[in-house]
């Protein structure tokens, strides 16, 4: 009987990353820009997505993959009403979406006739940060109502972001929110991160966000 | 919070490497887990004890190599560990810093037993 130490050095989520890279290639081959939207529960993911669809649907074709922990269709119904094909992926209680769940959603979307795919991730600031889904960009929605301390409490999710949306800015007069403290935390983790303050309720701040999104969709076409 | 999926992945990796190397049994798994990976070793151990039953890893022991969260200051090259709240460089107060350790999340090696050479 012999005992041997075998070197492995393999990322624990290697299998997920493999599928995620395939997803990204499928999106790219279809000239689709895919964005993964993460946030805490109640940050306003669906409100932002619905508003974004309403303002962009005349210019581009948008599909949505809705992640939900249970098979309630509240979010996908709202998105469908807004005028975009939405498929719902249920995680069966899991706290995050993974690349394979996104693949199942992709199989139900008409990828040949879409320009933009939005993934609405599970409301959670911890787990979704670890799982690459195969999107081209990761976005986080941080509502001002959540407080200015979130980058300090959930540092990991801020590290892998390409864009940050600070939402519910119409509530700033009513909540304790020190924007400098928030920005300092973000800057430590992700220097120079593109940030759009928005309010889905008033429409304030949507123009720069839509311009950014449109340029990404145009790049994917090129 | 997602330790169950993570533990399933660790087990799949361990079994694949054990089989590739002709193991009859796996006696140990060496993991490297950074402070920022948000994983609780106790929780991984709990799921591990359940998942390994009936597998080649049934009698294995998990070893955790915990790596602290360390920032490097791009301004003055000072390195500092984060224990509680994240801060800018304590030496020069710059916020131009980058994480050099704490994001680790991999299976480093496994220890296998072969009944016959």
Image (cartoon, coloured by chain):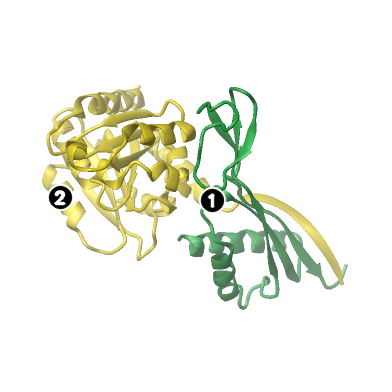
Residue B95 position, x and y percent, is: 50, 28
Viewed as shown, does residue A181 lie left or right of B96?
left
Chain under label 2? A
For the residue pair A208 and B73, the one nearer the viewer reads as B73
Viewed as shown, does residue A55 lie left or right of A158?
left
Whether A206 is drawn above or below B43: the answer is above
Helix, strand or loop for disc 2: helix
Residue A197 position, x and y percent, is: 26, 31
Quadrant of the drawing holding the C terminus of chain B: bottom right
Chain under label 1? B
Which numbered mark, 1 or 2, is in the foreground of this view?
1
Q: Residue at x 23, y 45 (%)?
A: A44
Circles 1 and 2 on the same chain: no
Helix, strand or loop for disc 1: helix
Q: Residue at x 38, y 43 (%)?
A: A149
Reading the image, the residue beneath label 2 is: A78
Residue B37 circle label: 1
Q: Quadrant of residue B111?
A: bottom right
Whether B40 is drawn above or below B50: the answer is above
Viewed as shown, does residue A21 lie left or right of A67?
right
Residue A41 position, x and y percent, is: 28, 53
Quadrant of the drawing holding the N terminus of chain B: bottom left
Query: Which chain is assigned yellow?
Result: A
Whether A95 is drawn above or below A121: the answer is below
**Colour seen for chain B:** green
Q: Residue at x 47, y 38 (%)?
A: A159
Q: Residues within 10 Å of mark 1 (few under 14, many from 20)?
A: some
């Amino acid at each position: 009987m012999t005992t041997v130490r075998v070197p492995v050095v393999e990322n624990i989520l290697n299998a997920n990353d493999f599928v995620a890279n395939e997803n990204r290639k499928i999106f790219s081959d279809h000239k689709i820009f895919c964005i993964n939207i993460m946030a805490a529960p109640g940050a306003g993911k669906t409100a932002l997505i619905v508003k974004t669809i309403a303002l962009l649907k005349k210019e581009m074709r948008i599909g949505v993959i809705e992640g939900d922990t249970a098979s309630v269709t509240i979010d996908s119904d709202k998105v469908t009403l807004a005028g975009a094909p939405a498929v719902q992926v249920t995680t069966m209680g899991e706290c995050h979406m993974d690349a394979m769940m996104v693949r199942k959603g992709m199989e139900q979307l008409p990828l040949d006739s879409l320009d933009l795919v939005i993934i609405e991730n599970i409301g959670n600031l911890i787990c979704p940060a670890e799982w690459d889904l195969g999107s081209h960009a990761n976005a986080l929605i941080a509502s001002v109502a959540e407080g200015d301390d979130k980058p300090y409490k959930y540092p990991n999710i801020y590290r892998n972001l390409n864009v940050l949306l600070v939402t519910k800015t119409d509530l700033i007069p009513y909540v304790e929110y020190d924007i400098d403290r928030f920005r300092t935390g973000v800057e430590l983790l992700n220097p120079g991160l593109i940030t759009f303050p928005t309010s889905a309720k008033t429409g304030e701040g949507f123009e720069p966000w839509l311009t950014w999104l449109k340029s990404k969709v145009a790049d994917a076409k090129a | 919070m997602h330790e169950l999926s993570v533990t399933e992945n660790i087990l799949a990796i361990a079994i694949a490497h054990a089989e590739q190397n002709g193991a009859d049994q796996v006696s140990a798994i060496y993991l490297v887990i950074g402070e920022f990976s948000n994983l609780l070793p106790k929780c991984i151990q709990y799921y591990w004890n359940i998942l390994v039953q009936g597998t080649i890893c049934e009698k294995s022991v998990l070893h955790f190599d915990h790596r602290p969260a360390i920032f490097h200051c791009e301004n003055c090259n000072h390195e500092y560990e984060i224990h509680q709240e994240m801060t800018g460089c304590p030496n020069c107060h710059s916020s131009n810093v980058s994480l050099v350790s704490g994001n680790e999340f991999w299976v480093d090696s496994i220890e296998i037993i072969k009944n016959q050479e």
